[in-house]
Amino acid sequence: MEFWPVVLFSGIFAILFAFWLARDVLSQDKGTKAMQEVAALIFEGAMAFLNRQYRTIALFAIIAAVIIGGLIGGLANDPGLGVRTSIAFLVGAFCSGLAGFIGMFIAVQANLRTAAAAQRSVRDAIIVSLRGGAVSGFLVVSMSMLGVLLMFWLYGGFNLVPGQPLLSGPALVPFSIVGFGFGASFVALFAQLGGGIYTKAADVGADLVGKVEAGIPEDDPRNAAVIADLVGDNVGDCAGRGADLFESTAAENIGAMILGVSLYVVTGNTSWVFFPLVVRSIGVFASMVGILAVGVGDVSDPQRKLDQGYWAMTIVAAIGIFAVVWIMLDQNYWFALAGLTGLLTSVAFVYITQYYTAGGWRPVQELARASRTGPATNIISGFAVGLESTGVTAVIIAIALGLSYFFGVQAGSLTPALATGGVNPGLFGTAVATMGMLTTVAYVLSMDTFGPITDNAGGIAEFSQAPADVRHITDVLDGIGNTTKALTKGYAVGSAALAAFLLFSAYLDEVKLRENLTSFPVDLSNVTVFIGGFLGLMLIFLFSSLAIRAVGNAAGAIIEEVRRQFREHPGIMEGTERPDYARAVDITTRAGLHEMILPGLLAVLYPIVVGFVLKAEAAAGLLMVGTMGGILMATVLNNSGGTWDNAKKFIELGMLKGDGGTVLGKGTDAHAASVVGDTVGDPFKDTAGPSLHVLIKLLSTITLVMAPLFITR
C-alpha cells in the first residue's frame, strides 16, 4: 500500500485550514480608529523590517548555495550531488522564509482584532489570538511535509528498489535532500538572530528609559521606542520562531527518512520511508481538533482553556500514533510505545517549562519576592532558576532516549528483518519517538504566536487609551502569552535533543558508507575527537556571547535615541508633541540586520572549517558535545529569561505583597527591580536561547550535507 497520498492530502488540507483561519481572523471587528492607527504603524514597521531582512538572507542563501555546490562537486568529486544539494538548499530556504512571512503577516493583522475582541470578552480575545497564531502553525507543518515530499519525488525517491546499495541511485535521495533541511536551518538562524536582536533591543530600550527612568507606563505613546518594540514582537517571535520550527520538522523528517530507506532496502516495505511524514499528518489533524476545542464552552481561566485544547490534541495524537504504527509497521506495538514516549516527552516539557515560567508556581513567585530587595537579588535568583531547570530537562531527555531505544530493540524481536543489513532497530525507536514528539508542533507553534499577538494587543489598547477593563484583559492574556512562548522554547529544546541523536546517527552512517567501514566509533579518548568536542562546546558559549552582546549594542543606540527625544523635545512628556517613532524603528532595523551577520556566519562556517581541517571524527565530536552543551545552555537562557519576564508581570498585576500586606505594584522599587531583571532576561530568552535551538540543528544538517568533505582521502 502506498502512503504518500495521505501526506499530500493532509498537507494540502492543512494549508486550506490555515487560510480558513486567516479569513476568519481578518473578518473580525478592527476596533476603534485610534486602534487602527496604532496597528497600521506596527504593520508598516514589521513589513519594512521583514522585507529588508529577507532580501539580506536571500543574498546570503544564494552565495551559500553556490559555495556548497562547488565544494561538494569539486572537492568531493561529485558534481551531481553538489547541484542536487544546492537546489534542495534553496528550496528549503524559500519554503522556510515563505512560511515565516505569511505567518507574521496574519499575526500582525490579528493583534488589532484581538485588541478589539478584548472590548467584548476574554473568550473572543483568546479565540482570535489563538487562531491568528494557528495560521503560522499549520503553514509551517504543511509546507515542511510537502517540501520534503516534493524533493523526494523530484530526485527519484519513488524509484527505490529493494536490495539496492545505499548511496547509489534512488537510495541516495534522502542524503541529497538533507540540503532542504540545511536551507531551512540557514534561514531560521538569520531570521531568529535578526528578529531577536531587533525585538529585544527595542524592548530593553523602551523599558529602561520609559518605565525606569521616565516613570511612564509600558506601551505609553510618549515613548519613541514603543512602536519598534511592538514591531519586534512579530519579527522575532512570529517570523523567527516559525522559521525555527519549520527547520525542526524538515530536518527531523529527513533524518527519519534516511533510516527508513535503509530499512526499505532490507525489507522492501515503503512504509518505513513514509512513516515519518504520515505521523506528521496525524499531528496536523490532531492540532486542528485542539484549535477548535478551545472555542468550546466557557472561558473563566484562559490558561486552562489553552490546556483544554492541548489535551484534546494530545489524546487524538496518541490514538493516531498507535493506529499508524499498527497499520504501517507490521502491528509492532513496541514502536507504538516509542511514539507515545515521544508524545509524553512533549507533554513533560510543556509542563516543566510552565512550572518554571508561569506565575502560579514557586520560581516566578520566588523571583518576585527577591525583587523587594533590589535588582541584584532579582538577577541572582533568576539566573539560579535557569541553572536549576537543566536538571529535570536532562533527566527527561535521558529517559526519553533510553526508553525509546529500548522499545526499538524490543521491536526488532517482533520484526526480525529489522536487524539484518546492519540496521539498528533501537535507533529507529528513537526516530519514532522524535516523530511522536513533533505531532504536537502545529498546536504548540499556535500557542507560541498567541504570545506576541496578545502582547501587541495590549500595546494597541494602551496606546489608543482603551478602557481599563480592556487593558486588564490584554494584560492577563499577555502574561499567559509569556508562558506559552516559554513553553514553545522548552518544547523546541526537547525536540532538538531527540532529533540531534537521530541526526548524529545518520551522520555516522553516512561516513561509514562513504568510507566503506563496518563501524565508525567516536572515542573521546582520541585526541582529535576530544579537540572537536571541545571546540564544539566553545562555539555554544561564543555564539551566545555574540548574540547577547548584539542586543546590548543595539539597545544602547535605542536608549540614547529615546533620551535624546525626551531631552530635545520636552513637549513629548507633556503630550503636546509626537515622538519620532520612525527614527526608533529605523535604528533597530539597521542594528538588527547588521548585528546578526557575525554570529550567523560563525555558526555556518565554524563546523565546516573544523570538519574540513580535522576530518570526520572531529566533526562528530563537535556535533555530539556541541549539541549537549547547546541544549543545556538554551535551557538556562530560556527559563531564566521567562521567569524574569513573568516575575515582572506578576508584580504589575498587583500580586506581590510587602510588609503589612501593602501591594507592591507598578511604580514601586520592587517593580523597578523586576524591570531591570526582565531587561537582562530579554536577550537570553528571545535572542540567544531560541537561536541556540537553530544552531543545534544547524550543526546536524551541516555535518550531514558536508560529510563528503570530511572523509579521509
Image: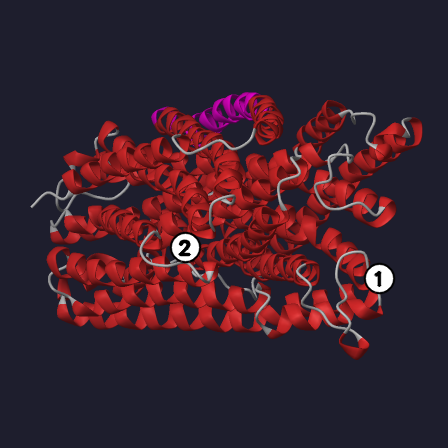
Q: Who's the residue at 68% across and 28% down the image?
A: 589
Q: Helix, strand, or loop for circle 1? A: helix
Q: Helix, strand, or loop for circle 2? A: helix
Question: Is 10 on the left-hand or right-hand side of 533?
Answer: left
Q: Amino acid at mark 2?
A: Ala
According to the picture, the residue beneath numbered tag 2 turns out to be 499
- Calculate the distance from the C-alpha at mark 1 to the C-alpha at mark 2: 45 Å
Question: Is 498 on the left-hand or right-hand side of 393?
Answer: left
According to the picture, the residue beneath numbered tag 1 turns out to be 669
Mark on residue 572?
none
Q: Is residue 54 magenta?
A: yes
The magenta-colored residue range is 53-80
Q: Who's the residue at 56% across and 41% down the image?
A: 457
Main secondary structure type of the part rendered in magenta: helix
Looking at the image, the residue that sits furthest to the bottom is 660
Q: Who's the residue at 68% across and 32% down the image?
A: 227
- Within 10 Å of the Cα at label 2, are there few (<14), some (14-19), or many (20+) other Cα atoms? many
